[in-house]
Amino acid sequence: MTDKEKPMLPLTLISPGREVILRAIAGGRQIRSRLTDMGFVPDLEFKVLQNFKPGPCVISIGNARIALGRGVSEKILVVEKE
């Protein structure tokens, strides 16, 4: 199964240590614009470092670490990278 055929999941359901590929942002214009300005574009690959409720989701993009609130993380739809 290719990455394009895999089901999209919200970032909040991905376990720490997994690498994912961004497929879509399921929010309104404001959140999509904000995340796009931060570099969140389709096919972006990143790693989930921390994802424990009720805290933030911490991801790694290159050498940068970004903490995202749970509400924002719910709107980021990804597929797991093989």
Image (cartoon, rainbow, N blue to C red):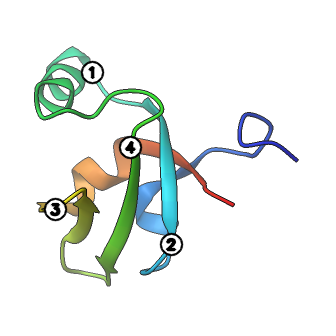
Residue name at image x 26 percent, y 65 percent:
59
Q: Nearer the viewer, residue 4 or 73?
A: 4
What amino acid is found at the position of numbered circle 1 in the picture? Gly
Instruction: Check residue 28 in the rendering and tell me which mark sits there, or answer none.
Output: 1
Q: Nearer the viewer, residue 57 or 44?
A: 44
Mark pair 1, 4: CA separation: 12 Å
Q: Is residue 19 left or right of residue 5?
A: left
Helix or strand or loop: what does disc 4 sit on? strand
Residue name at image x 30 percent, y 82 percent:
53
Mark pair 1, 2: CA separation: 27 Å
Helix or strand or loop: what does disc 3 sit on? loop
What amino acid is found at the position of numbered circle 4 in the picture? Ile
Q: Earlier in the sequence, mark 3 or mark 1?
A: 1
Asked whether the residues under the numbered discs 3 and 1 touch, taking CB atoms below 8 Å apart as contact, a structural biologist would say no
User: Which of the two marks, 3 or 4, is nearer to us in this view?
Assistant: 3
Residue under numbered circle 4 = 76
Q: Earlier in the sequence, mark 3 or mark 2?
A: 2
Instruction: Check residue 63 in the rendering and tell me which mark sits there, or answer none.
Output: 3
What amino acid is found at the position of numbered circle 2 in the picture? Arg
What amino acid is found at the position of numbered circle 3 in the picture? Asn
